[in-house]
Image (cartoon, grey):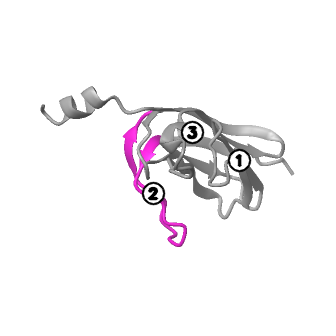
């Protein structure tokens, strides 16, 4: 019997509505972008559609640019795993800009974030995001001033 080859497609990426871990619904895309303004609570990441892979293990990792926690330590990359739940499954991988260390403010969020998904030892999806400081002039110009 022939081995089924999974079909993986990134369906959206950028800034999303806030993700609710208790809900079955994925967050909704608000803006397609790979540049994210560092504002507390901004949710960003990407969504993939995976077909023909029910029951396979999906591993994921988020590499952040050196976020400092409340104890002054740099956070390790966030990783995890989940089994593909159906033969036509959508999965969201994302994170939120957070103010964890009041000393550094949001600045420890600035830089390149890399989000990776792997299956059977192979990278199946990857996106890089650049979190940048807000340009105050552009902020007010965007609002008509």
Query: Can you tell which quarter of the image residue 15 is in?
Result: top left
Please tell me which of labels 3 and 1 falls first in the chain. Answer: 1
Query: Which residue is labeled 1 in the image?
Result: 73
Task: For marks 2 and 3, give the CA distance.
Answer: 25 Å
Q: Position of residue 103 (x, y in %)?
A: 54, 45
Q: Earlier in the sequence, mark 1 or mark 2?
A: 2
- Residue 5 visible in the picture: no
Give the residue pinned by disc 3.
Answer: 108
Please, is residue 93 above or below residue 64 in the view?
A: below
1 or 2: mark nearer the eye: 1
In the rendered image, the quadrant that contains the C terminus is: top left
Q: Residue at x 64, y 43 (%)?
A: 8
Magenta residue check for 27: yes
User: What's the residue at 44%, 39% (across, down)?
Assistant: 38
Is residue 49 visible in the rendered structure shown here?
Answer: yes
The residue that disc 2 covers is: 27
The x, y position of residue 70, in whole percent, is 62, 54
Q: Is there CB contact under 8 Å for labels 2 and 3?
A: no
Q: Is residue 22 rendered magenta in the image?
A: yes
Could you tell me which secondary element the residue under label 2 belongs to? Answer: loop
Relative to 48, 38 lies left or right? left
Residue extent of the magenta highlight = 12-33
57 to 123, vertically: above or below: below
Residue 32 picture location, percent across and down = 41, 37
Viewer-proximal residue among 102 and 119:
102
Look at the numbered disc 3 and give the secondary structure of its residue.
helix
Nearest the camera: 144 or 117? 144
Residue drawn at x 26%, y 33% as measured from the top left: 139
Element at badge 1?
loop
Relative horizontal placement of residue 126, taking residue 18 as reference (left or right): right
Q: Nearer the viewer, residue 100 or 115?
A: 100
């Amino acid at each position: 019997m022939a081995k089924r080859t999974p079909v993986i497609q990134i369906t959206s990426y950028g800034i999303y509505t806030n993700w609710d871990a208790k809900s079955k619904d994925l967050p909704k895309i608000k803006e397609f972008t790979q540049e994210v303004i560092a504002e507390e609570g901004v949710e960003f990441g990407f969504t993939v559609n995976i077909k023909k892979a029910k029951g396979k293990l999906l591993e994921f990792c988020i590499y952040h640019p050196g976020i400092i926690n409340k104890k002054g330590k740099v956070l390790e990359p966030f990783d995890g795993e989940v089994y593909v739940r159906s033969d036509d499954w959508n999965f969201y991988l994302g994170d939120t800009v957070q103010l964890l260390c009041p000393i550094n403010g949001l600045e420890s969020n600035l830089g390149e974030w890399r989000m990776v998904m792997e299956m059977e030892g192979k990278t199946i999806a990857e996106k890089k995001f650049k979190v940048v400081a807000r340009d105050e002039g552009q902020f007010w110009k965007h609002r008509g001033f």
